Amino acid sequence: MTTNENTARIVESFEQAKNGLPGTWLANAREGAIHSFATAGFPTQRLESWKYTNLNRLARGAFDPLAEIATPDVDAWSGLFIDGCDRIVIVNGRVDPVHSSIGAPSDGVTVSALSEAIDETDPELEKQLAQIAPDEGAPLVALNTAFMRDGLVLRLAAGTVLERPVQVVHIVDSGDTALALHPRTLVVAGDNSEATVVETFAGAAGAGYWTNAVTEIRVGRNASIRHLKRQSESVGAYHTALTQVRLDRDARFSSVALTVGGMLSRNEMKVAFEGEGAECVLAGGSLLRGRQHADSTTEADHSVPHTRSDQVFRNVLDGNAHSVFQGGVIVRKEAQKTDSSQSNRNLLLSSGAQADTKPELRIFADDVKCAHGATVGDLDKASMFYLESRGIPPEQAKALLIQAFVGEILEDIADGVVRDHIETAITDWMAEAQ
Amino acid sequence: MSFLSIKNLHASVGGKEILKGIDLEVGKGEIHAIMGPNGSGKSTLSYVLSGREGYDVTEGEIIFKGQNVLDMEPHERAGAGIYLAFQYPVEIPGVSNLTFLKTAVNAVRKARGQDELDAINFLKFAREQGNILEMKDELLKRPVNVGFSGGEKKRNEIFQMAMLEPSLAILDETDSGLDIDALRIVSEGVNKLRSPERSMIVITHYQRLLDHIVPDFIHVLAGGKFVASGGKELALELEKEGYAKFGIDEDASAAA
């Protein structure tokens, strides 16, 4: 099947599916989105922002966006559940009410599965969903809008502080059916509110599958959202994701996104500064081996004065793995006193591994501070000898150094259980090497 | 059986011969000082003993407690009881001093057939040893050597030595770059670690260190060979008359 034929097949499957998708009020938006996807098609490497990531095989893949799979053994995945948090579990694209658990309701906080939220009439939701991350110029976002069925909706009224984290866990275990999943997360944080949101993706090898996720986050005045993402998909899976964040005045956003799974993945983080005094920290990284490919693409778009963005990305590559970092910073003419920094370091554990790193700074204001730096290197021999000379065997010394290298992206995670959730992915990755 | 026996040791770095036939016998509990000008091969000897990559032994042997050291990996040598205090301790960002030491202590304990220490006992042990060297608690929590002053780094080397309980400690220019207070703390620490069960090789450029750590024997290394050996009085001769007494042109050997 050619890419064009496959695009036509996807549009055809939308025609079959559309009446069964939740949220009748979304029907027009879905129609518009599939039209926009059909016109643009899959992104190709001719686009500068997709230069290093080739979606050809994905674009020809016959992934099924409709199949409803009998619920597999979800308990086998319970190690991914963070204790003591509100949790929505999505299995094969549909909410699993048995394993989802929402604690005692707090005033001003709504945590719900997307399918349930969009089946109700809710003018507030209509103003937010698919508005924070527009479909225009983003065919994969459009495709998600067309097919989105489930995910997480978190809304915080002004002044609410949610102490326990909210976790959405996506599990794919679909046997012989190669699924396409289009999950959507929406976080709307009112003025002065605070919360921690964790997105976890995992799956079984099976027939291979494609997760195409969109996360929309709006952070109100002086509000604070901490976002974490653990991508532990099956190594046979495709994972494409966009997180679009909009920050109002004095809002704070921090994100840590770790990739260990997926054969090919693309994690795109975009932050739009819409109010003065807003700040964000984007941290991320990947631990890859075999023929895995992981692309982290960012965009911090400063359009108002006095805002700050910091980007910290670390990749550890073994085998023939390939990492991509495209760090985007836009400082528009009005955005004086912008302070932005960017650092990408890559650790190559084998001669077959490859890291591409590209800072992309577009600066139109004249009174700003924009720093960037990138390195690619192997394990430091002097450090290895120092550790070994103290009796530490080479494998253990290597693990300590890798953990220290990638650990930099975890430094600011204050919540212990959330930190453990991300750290476990790192220790599991290293255990698999032995 | 001698404790440490080095016979006719030749070693090269990058194809260039640095050690040109070293013979050294160190008995149990003895302290040997090795003095010599820059470039004489002092640090090379310490790296060869601890097994650093790139230091190739071309001839000779090193036998430690009956074991052929040259057949052992660096971590195995540490397990067997060899410890090197580095001239330039390495900074390791992201690994706390405590995590590093706990891993190291338990690795050598395992190699020596001892039980591993649990978190509580390890911390107790670290506090005790840390007090001897006036190590601030804060230094234990910081990443290994990162942001340490020169003196703190050297103190950390001796602290690690106290934790790893070696039977042969090699101190590579532990005195260089230290002011007199730091030198006093470091050498007091070393003296507290002296024991009839522990031998030491103290490598230094200056006689000053040997006022604090008094050796049993002194060897003068020049051009990759020992040119003189004797008791501690040898250090005083060197102090008075310099290396020239041994036919060494210090500037020329430094350039070599």
Image (cartoon, rainbow, N blue to C red):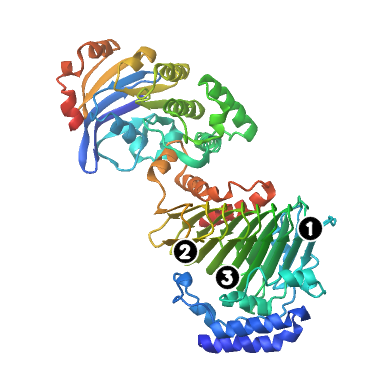
Secondary structure beneath dot 1 equals loop
Q: Which mark is residue B89?
A: none
Asked whether B57 or A239 is in front, the reply is A239
Q: Which residue is mark 2?
A: A324
Q: Earlier in the sequence, mark 2 or mark 3?
A: 3
Q: Chain of mark 2?
A: A
Numbered tag placed on residue A157 in the rendering: 1
Q: Toward which corner of the image does residue B60 lie, by quadrant?
A: top left
Residue drawn at x 65%, y 52% is A250
Q: Which secondary structure, mark 2? A: strand
Determine crowd level at label 3: few under 14, some 14-19, many 20+ residues with C-alpha closer than 10 A: many
Q: Is A256 situated above or below B42?
A: below
Residue B147 seen from this side:
yes
Amino acid type for the residue under numbered disc 1: Ala
Q: Are marks 2 and 1 in contact (CB under 8 Å)?
A: no
Asked if badges 2 and 3 are on one and the same chain, I answer yes
| Residue at point 59%, 67% (across, down) | A242
Q: Which residue is mark 3?
A: A240
In 3D space, how far apart are the residues under numbered discs 2 and 3 (Cα atoms)?
14 Å
